[in-house]
Amino acid sequence: MTVTLANTMARGITSGAVLMLVGCGLPLHETVQPEASLTVRSETGTPIQGAQVRLNMHAIPSTKRGVAVVLTDTDGRASFPEVKEWHTRYPLMMHGMVEYRWAWCVSKAGYQDHDERWSEFKPYAVVTMKEGKSSGCADMPQDLK
């Protein structure tokens, strides 16, 4: 195989481009909170006003966590706006990208807490609360796997 100047330059340019991608971060405008809405109803279908709805966020592999809290309105609805932030990510490096996970938790005195930490997140959902004792949602869930 004959090594020419063109082949050597092509390999050098390709290697340089890969090194540049690995070493340089990419600015990304990431959704850290999706636009979401949750409707809370009793077992009879009546809207529950004043229920505390928490939208919990967990960034993986980061330790970053967040929570947004809204009380339901007269229609039993709690709405959350989309929130985006700029972050620098390194897609070709181990742990260079972050995955965001969200989970609902709903509490109201006189009703059992509704915690969807272990469920697939649905940004537009209806929750049926069962009568019972409420202990409230944890301030910051330890895990949103």
Image (spheres, rainbow, N blue to C red):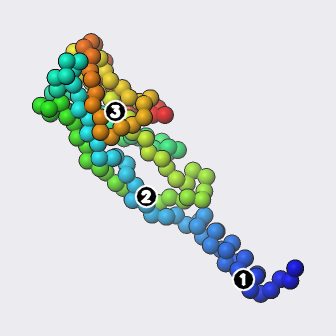
Query: Which amino acid type is marked by label 2?
Result: His
> Looking at the image, which is closer to me, 136 or 77?
77
Vertical comparison of 89 with 142: above or below? below
Mark 1–mark 2 Cα distance, whole angstroms, equals 34 Å
- Element marked by disc 3: strand
**Decide: marks 1, 2 in contact (CB < 8 A)?**
no
**Decide: marks 2, 3 in contact (CB < 8 A)?**
no
Residue beneath disc 2: 87
Residue beneath disc 1: 9
Q: Can residue 111 be spotted in the picture?
A: no
Callout in the foreground (2, 3):
3
Labels 2 and 3: the sequence-earlier one: 2
Labels 1 and 2: the sequence-earlier one: 1
Q: Residue at x 23, y 28 (%)?
A: 40
Query: Which amino acid type is marked by label 3?
Result: Trp
* Residue 41, image x, y percentages: 21, 25
Relative to 65, is 110 on the left or the right?
Answer: left
Q: Residue at x 50, y 58 (%)?
A: 89
Mark 2, Cα crowd under 10 Å, few <14 / some 14-19 / many 20+, is few
Q: Which mark is residue 104?
A: 3
Report which quarter residue 49 is drawn in: top left
Q: Which mark is residue 139?
A: none
Q: Residue at x 64, y 68 (%)?
A: 19
- Element marked by disc 2: strand
**Decide: marks 1, 3 in contact (CB < 8 A)?**
no
List the single residue furthest toward the front: 45
Vertical comparison of 55 with 133: above or below? below
Vertical comparison of 127 with 6: above or below? above
Query: Which amino acid type is marked by label 1?
Result: Met
